[in-house]
Image (cartoon, helix red, strand yellow):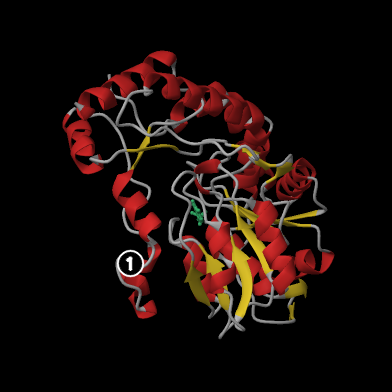
């Protein structure tokens, strides 16, 4: 039995009628951009996070880009972030002309090691951009304390953490802005590209609404050079339906992770470490293996799915060779890139599928 990394068809089939009706209704009304579906979704997502504003945008990458621009980050500025993430996190910093400054990660949670932030702060540092990787919150308490002390903005990359919490607060609601991706395979995913920024700050929300719509507040009057970055109504209609189920999806992911943990409780496998301060929503279920490449090869040969998120930390990517960082400079990230392996994870996984994957991993280990 082969098990895919994600199965979006199962989820669609479970609510096909509802989705089909909602999508067709958008088409019937021919209101495709900036309509009632998007507005309703923004309200639901703001309420869910206990914040005042949510602004739909065209992708998670755009959410980060527009948030950085709204925060006034620009050329010459430095933004402290993690190298162990998807490249979009750093790309957004580069888009506004700022420089990503990478701090190493904690080997247990794979998240930014907050104790290393202070040593990387310079007079150019303007913001910290934590990424709640795999669905688990960064240590936001100490991070916010450092940010406050140095007058830095905090923009959270929540692309993988929709619904996860830090000390009872939803990720994205702790810093100035939280940025979400609705890429299809994310915990809350649409049927194309989509994203959102949440904030409690009315000025930031107003600026984001303008930036996503060509720098315009009144039609055909443009206050600044903005972007075409709106969340369309078909995507919002799909998201309004899936949003109602997000807590159940995340609960099922947690149950699946717990099952994996019991089956994979053997020497040689480091199962995910949950921090005491938050809830992990398992966007990915990621284990650590000393001999990762050999195990992955045996899994590939056995036609069992697994993926490496991510094989090359950002400071060693060709795209960032201009930063001049050498192998060995961020050792925990580099070691994680050599040792991590993500296994199939989605809410609808069955007990049998989980056992099949786990058995294949254990077999590949020996
Ligand atoms: C998916 C992802 C993004 C980008 O989101 P898109 O919607 O694909 O643009 C940014 N950061 C992280 C950590 C992600 O996983």
Q: How many marks?
A: 1
124 lies left or right of 338? right
Residue at numbered disc 1: 316
Q: Whole-percent x and y of residue 324?
A: 35, 78
Q: Residue furthest top?
A: 352
Q: Report the quarter where the C terminus lies.
A: top left
Determine the image quadrant of residue 17.
top right
Q: Report the quarter where the N terminus lies.
A: top left
Residue depicted at x 65% and y 59%: 143
Residue depicted at x 73% and y 77%: 220
Q: Is residue 4 above or below residue 337?
A: above
Q: Whole-percent x and y of residue 111?
A: 51, 51
Determine the image quadrant of residue 351.
top left
The answer to whether one can see residue 163 in this image is no
- Pick whichever, 327 or 136, lies toward us: 327
Q: Is residue 264 above or below residue 30?
A: above
- Pick whichever, 17 or 96, lies toward us: 96
66 lies left or right of 353? right
Residue depicted at x 22% and y 29%: 365
Q: Is residue 234 above or below residue 245?
A: below
The answer to whether one can see residue 237 in this image is yes
Could you tell me which secondary element the residue under label 1 belongs to?
helix
Q: Whole-percent x and y of residue 69?
A: 64, 74
Q: Whole-percent x and y of residue 264?
A: 37, 24
Count neighbours of disc 1 (C-alpha within 10 A) and say few if under 14, some if 14 to 19, many if 20 or more. some
Q: Is residue 78 above or below residue 256?
A: below
């Amino acid at each position: 039995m082969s098990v895919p990394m994600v199965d979006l068809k199962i989820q669609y089939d479970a609510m096909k009628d509802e989705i089909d009706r909602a999508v067709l209704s958008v088409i019937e009304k021919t209101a495709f951009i900036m309509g009632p579906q998007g507005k309703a979704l923004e309200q639901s997502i703001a309420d869910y996070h206990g914040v005042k504003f949510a602004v739909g945008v065209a992708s998670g990458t755009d959410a980060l880009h527009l948030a950085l621009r709204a925060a006034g980050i620009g050329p010459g500025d430095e933004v402290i972030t993690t190298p162990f993430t998807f490249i979009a996190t750093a790309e957004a910093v580069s888009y506004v002309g700022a420089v990503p400054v990478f701090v190493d990660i904690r080997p247990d949670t794979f998240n930014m090691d907050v104790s290393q932030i202070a040593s990387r702060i310079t007079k150019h540092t303007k913001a910290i951009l934590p990424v709640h990787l795999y669905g688990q919150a960064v240590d936001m308490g100490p991070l916010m304390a450092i940010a406050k002390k140095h007058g830095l903005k905090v923009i959270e990359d929540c692309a993988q953490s929709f619904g996860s919490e830090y000390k009872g607060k939803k990720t994205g609601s702790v810093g100035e802005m939280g940025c979400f991706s609705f890429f299809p395979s994310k915990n809350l995913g649409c049927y194309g590209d989509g994203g959102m920024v949440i904030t409690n700050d009315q000025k930031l929300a107003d600026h984001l609404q303008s930036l996503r719509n060509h720098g315009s507040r009144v039609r055909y009057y443009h206050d600044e050079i903005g972007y075409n970055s709106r969340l369309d109504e078909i995507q919002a209609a799909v998201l309004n339906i899936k949003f109602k189920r997000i807590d159940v999806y995340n609960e099922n992911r947690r149950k699946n992770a717990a099952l994996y943990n019991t089956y994979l409780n053997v020497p040689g496998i480091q199962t995910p470490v949950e921090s005491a301060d938050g809830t992990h929503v398992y966007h990915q279920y990621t284990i650590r293996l000393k001999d990762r490449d050999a195990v992955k090869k045996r899994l590939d040969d056995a036609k069992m799915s697994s993926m490496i998120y991510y094989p090359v930390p950002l400071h060693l990517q060709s795209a960032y060779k201009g930063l001049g960082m050498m192998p060995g400079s961020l050792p925990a990230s580099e070691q994680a890139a050599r040792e991590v392996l993500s296994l199939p994870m989605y809410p609808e996984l069955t007990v049998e599928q989980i056992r099949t994957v786990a058995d294949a991993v254990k077999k590949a280990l020996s």
